[in-house]
Image (cartoon, rainbow, N blue to C red):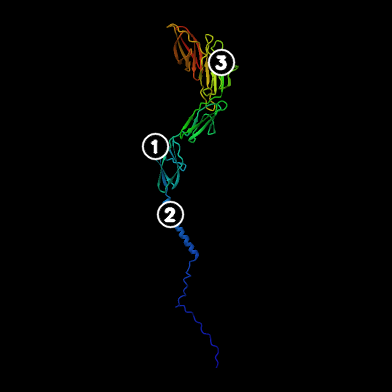
Amino acid sequence: MSRGPLPPPPMTQPMTSSLPPPSLPDAYPMQAPAGSRNLLVALAIVVIVGVGLGAYFLTQGKRGSLVVTVAGPGNKPVDGVEIYVDTQKQSQCSGSPCRVPDLKPGTHLLKVSAAGYPPTADVAVKVPSGEEAVQNVELARPSDGTGVKVTAEGRGLKLFVDDKEIGPLPQELRDMTPGDHKIRIDGGDRYEPFEKTVSVQPDDITDVAPKLKVKKGLATIKLGDNADGAKVMLVNGDERRPIPRFPLAVDLEANKSYSIVAEKRGYSRYEKRIDFDDGQAEKTFVIDMLPSSSGGGEAVAATERQAPRQSAPVSAPPVTRAVAAAPPPAAAAPAGANASLTFTSTPPSNVIFDGRPLGKTPKSATVPPGTHTVVFVHPEMGRKAKSINVNPGQKATLTVKFP
């Protein structure tokens, strides 16, 4: 009997309880996901930075202070001290030493000044964190500057230093560098040029007072006391040039010899030489004439009076007043027959009696009888001339008032 096909064998379950899982090769270790690893690294960096910043602020962030001591040359005490830190004036500092608190750690700029001393330059001072820095400052010796003072005066004068035009004279320069400098003065139309090398010393003003040589002078001629109607001439050698009007301002060559001559009936002859040898290129001459009891007389040298100088660039020309000579003093009278004269003036002035200076008013003198000429001279208001006739034994007072 034949048998049909055999049934399929029954399905079996795998056995899992007793067999270990298969092992992987060591070449393929287990790895964490990439996102987790980056997060761990970032956290580590944050922790490190935080710790570092904390340590920095704990050790470096504390504010410090600065103590400043100030003295003059030779450790001399200084009053009126002013202290600036980073251009800010420290109001709490009125003397030395001074403490400037609450400064950030680092470098600060310090500047010190005091009355009578030049201020210091900015000095860099380092203030450590949480510490106190000390800075000693010695102020320089007081100085008027370094340079030259040129005192020549005159119209048209210009100063050049090292060929650089400075301006009209007088001039004072205080910011020059020490050493040799060329000083040049352009005299314009009236003065010869001047040039000199000057050695300038540190913290010193060198005086330069050159005597300039005049090449063309300006003479102004005016009429003074008793000069109206006089015949006035400008004389140069054989040349006699009448002066038709007054005042007269005339340019004259300084290397030529000129004189002013004036004549008037009943007055002594007046004569005055014009020169510019003193370096003044502009002068004024005032003619004063004195009565002559004998109708004539010899000329006498004039006395000069310079008007007060004005500020540069134009200085006031000196004024020259001249008087003719009086006749010789009268012959002395017998003893006991002389006269007594008192001289007064407002304001006080100097007295010239018969050509002889007596002194300042009020002044008394015993004089011989007769006619005498008295000139009262004031240094700013000019001259006044008077004549007086006194008798033997007479007492008289002669008074004038300026101007």
Q: Amino acid at mark 1?
A: Gly
Gap in angstroms between the C-alphas marked 3 and 1: 67 Å
Q: Sequence-wise, which precedes: disc 2 or disc 1? A: 2
- Closer to us: 83 or 303: 303
Q: Sequence-wise, which precedes: disc 3 or disc 1? A: 1
Q: Residues within 10 Å of mark 1 (few under 14, many from 20)?
A: few
User: Which percent across, then down, holds residue 388?
Assistant: 49, 10
Q: Amino acid at mark 2?
A: Gly
User: Is mark 2 in CB contact (under 8 Å) with mark 1?
Assistant: no
Q: Quadrant of residue 133?
A: top left
Badge 2 element: helix
Q: Disc 2 marks which residue?
A: 54
Q: Which mark is residue 6?
A: none
Q: Disc 3 marks which residue?
A: 261
Q: Disc 1 marks which residue?
A: 74
User: Which percent across, then down, holds residue 325?
Assistant: 51, 13
- Closer to us: 334 or 50: 334
Name the outermost residue toward the bottom.
1
Mark 2 or 1: the one toward you: 1
Q: Residues within 10 Å of mark 3 (few under 14, many from 20)?
A: many
User: Is mark 3 in CB contact (under 8 Å) with mark 1?
Assistant: no
Badge 3 element: strand
Q: Sequence-wise, which precedes: disc 3 or disc 2? A: 2
Q: Is residue 336 left or right of residue 284?
A: left
Q: Is residue 173 above or below residue 14?
A: above
Q: Amino acid at mark 3?
A: Val
